Image (spheres, rainbow, N blue to C red):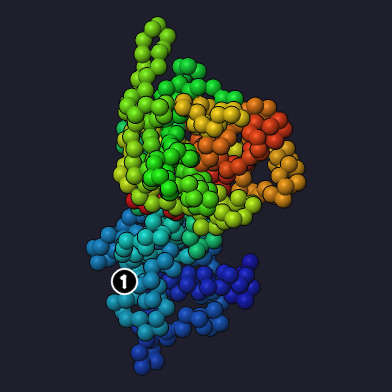
């Protein structure tokens, strides 16, 4: 079937124009015009679709619809400069040449030599690499610094969607999402590097980027020995990503422990927005994050007796100042809905990687879509352990069932607090719950041998641990694009 430009869906017309012009340049059918009538005439880019012959239109559409991806990142430009093979629409300098009807012979040659393939019907060019704007920098799934681009401008990720698309490739694309003005955006890295093969031991060195779970540098829990409200004492090295947020009192300048969080990289802690903005600031200002804590009564190492009469001790706690608090911009502390109750804390220095301090993995799947029934999750912290004790000296944990929206919504709807897709529920068993003091802490799922943070403690019933009334948690999976966009080197 022969398609003419008038038959094309409107959003394909510009693609056909650009692809058609570029195809002619590649095939040496486009030459420099002059006053001489025996030269091939130049065509204005916008008039191209109306003035091309049928042959040229068919040629353009063949190039458009039988597209391929040869471009790789990085590349070397014709001028010998390091570049990146990207969509020509993302390369302002070369796009300006293509759009200019007065382009010179040298510029046409530059376009030809810069060509590195096609992707999604649009030419790819080797574009001189410049540092991306700070607000478009991000970290890839492998922990490399990248740029938040439209999906079609990232050939390495687009290539994963070539049919047949595997489940692993689709999952990789989903967790690579980031926030940008483009409708579908991914964190595009500088090369096509792959993580270590399964079974290959990785050397875990923390950076600002969340670790790639496939390296097993996150989510590994070394606890397993003496094992919140109704909770059990954890092993001394269990959940090494748990953190306490230290607040400096407004009136007495003393340090208070009001919220928790989870270390997700060497320099970022995930917590709740209500822990850094709103009424909490009437009690204190978040100033430090405490890592590697077990028993808050002691400032040095904490020790416990183990089987056989021995003693197991932690390293001394590590306290790192908070460089910046990053609440979600759409969180409203005055609203009853508690939507977007999520925040990041950027630490002033890199956290160490030890048996007692290591990050938890970000979620690799939407747990609410899991077809398994009776899923149980873990929540841990130093929050209330009974109606009379508002804080625990020891790190505690409790297992809770994942609850459906149908189980969760009625109670909160009666109180004019409708839930939305950015929240999940867990709990509803009498005497077992997260509670006051656990705010900002992680709701965790053990995915294989790695732990993932699937929720952030947000709010729940009063008193805690009421039967058939689950607590509400911010759903971390839905905020992966926001998290990856906020994290900076």
Residue at position x 68%, y 28% from top? 429
Residue 488 appears in view: yes
Residue at position x 54%, y 32% from top? 390
Q: Residues within 10 Å of mark 1 (few under 14, many from 20)?
A: some
* Place of residue 25 in the rendered image (x, y in percent of width and height, measured from the top left): 40, 73
Residue at position x 43%, y 71% from top? 22
Q: Which residue is mark 1?
A: 110
Residue at position x 37%, y 26% from top? 298
* Place of residue 482 in the rendered image (x, y in percent of width and height, measured from the top left): 49, 52
Name above or below for residue 224 compared with residue 326.
above
Seen as rendered, the residue at the extreme front is 252
Q: Please state which of residues 202 and 107 is positioned toward the viewer in this rendering.
A: 202
Q: Quadrant of the N terminus?
A: bottom right
Q: Please state which of residues 384 and 131 is positioned toward the viewer in this rendering.
A: 384
* Place of residue 393 in the rendered image (x, y in percent of width and height, measured from the top left): 46, 27
**Figure quadrant of residue 353:** top left
Seen as rendered, the residue at the extreme left is 80
38 relative to 429 in the view: left or right: left
91 relative to 261 in the view: left or right: left
Name above or below for residue 460 compared with residue 139.
above
Name above or below for residue 345 compared with residue 197.
below
Q: Please state which of residues 169 and 213 is positioned toward the viewer in this rendering.
A: 213
* Place of residue 108 in the rendered image (x, y in percent of width and height, measured from the top left): 34, 75
| Image label count | 1
């Amino acid at each position: 079937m022969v398609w003419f430009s008038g038959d094309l869906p409107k959003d394909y017309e510009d693609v056909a124009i650009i692809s058609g012009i570029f195809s002619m340049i590649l095939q040496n059918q486009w030459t420099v015009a002059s006053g001489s009538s025996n030269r091939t005439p130049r065509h204005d880019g916008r008039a191209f679709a109306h003035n091309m012959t049928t042959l040229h239109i068919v040629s353009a559409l063949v190039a458009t619809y039988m597209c391929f991806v040869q471009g790789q990142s990085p590349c070397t430009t014709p001028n010998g400069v390091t570049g990146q093979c990207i969509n020509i629409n993302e390369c302002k300098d070369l796009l300006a040449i293509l759009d200019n009807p007065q382009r010179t012979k040298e510029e046409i040659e530059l376009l030809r030599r810069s060509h590195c393939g096609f992707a999604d019907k649009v030419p790819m060019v080797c574009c001189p690499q410049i540092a991306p704007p700070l607000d478009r920098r991000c970290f890839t799934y492998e922990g490399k610094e990248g740029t938040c681009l439209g999906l079609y401008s990232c050939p390495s990720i687009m290539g994963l969607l070539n049919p047949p698309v595997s489940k692993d490739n689709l999952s990789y694309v989903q967790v690579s999402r980031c926030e940008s003005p483009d409708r579908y955006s991914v964190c595009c890295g500088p090369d096509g590097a792959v993580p270590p093969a399964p079974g290959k031991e990785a050397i875990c060195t923390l950076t600002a980027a969340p670790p790639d779970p496939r390296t097993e540098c996150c989510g590994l829990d070394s606890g397993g020995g003496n094992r919140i409200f109704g909770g059990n004492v954890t092993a001394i090295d269990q959940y090494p990503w748990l953190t306490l947020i230290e607040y400096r009192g407004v009136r007495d300048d003393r340090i208070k422990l009001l919220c928790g969080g989870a270390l997700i990289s060497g320099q970022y802690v995930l917590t709740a927005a209500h822990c850094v903005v709103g009424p909490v600031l009437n009690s204190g200002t978040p100033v430090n994050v405490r890592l590697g804590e077990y028993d808050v009564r002691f400032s040095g190492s904490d020790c416990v007796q183990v089987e056989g009469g021995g003693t197991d001790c932690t390293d001394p706690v590590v306290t790192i100042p908070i460089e910046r608090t990053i609440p979600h911009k759409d969180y409203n502390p005055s609203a009853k809905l508690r939507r977007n109750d999520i925040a990041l804390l950027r630490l002033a220095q890199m956290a160490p990687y030890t048996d007692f301090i290591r990050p938890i993995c970000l979620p690799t799947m939407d747990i609410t879509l899991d077809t398994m029934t009776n899923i149980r999750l873990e929540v841990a912290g130093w929050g209330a352990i009974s109606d009379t004790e508002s804080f625990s000296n020891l790190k505690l944990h409790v297992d809770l069932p994942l609850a459906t929206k149908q189980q969760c919504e009625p109670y909160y709807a009666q109180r004019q607090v409708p839930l939305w897709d950015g929240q999940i529920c867990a709990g509803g068993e009498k005497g077992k719950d997260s509670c006051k003091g656990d705010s900002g802490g992680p709701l965790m799922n053990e995915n294989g041998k790695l732990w993932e943070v699937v929720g952030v403690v947000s709010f729940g019933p009063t008193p805690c641990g009421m039967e058939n009334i689950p607590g509400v948690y911010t759903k971390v999976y839905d905020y992966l694009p926001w998290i990856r966009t906020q994290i900076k080197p």
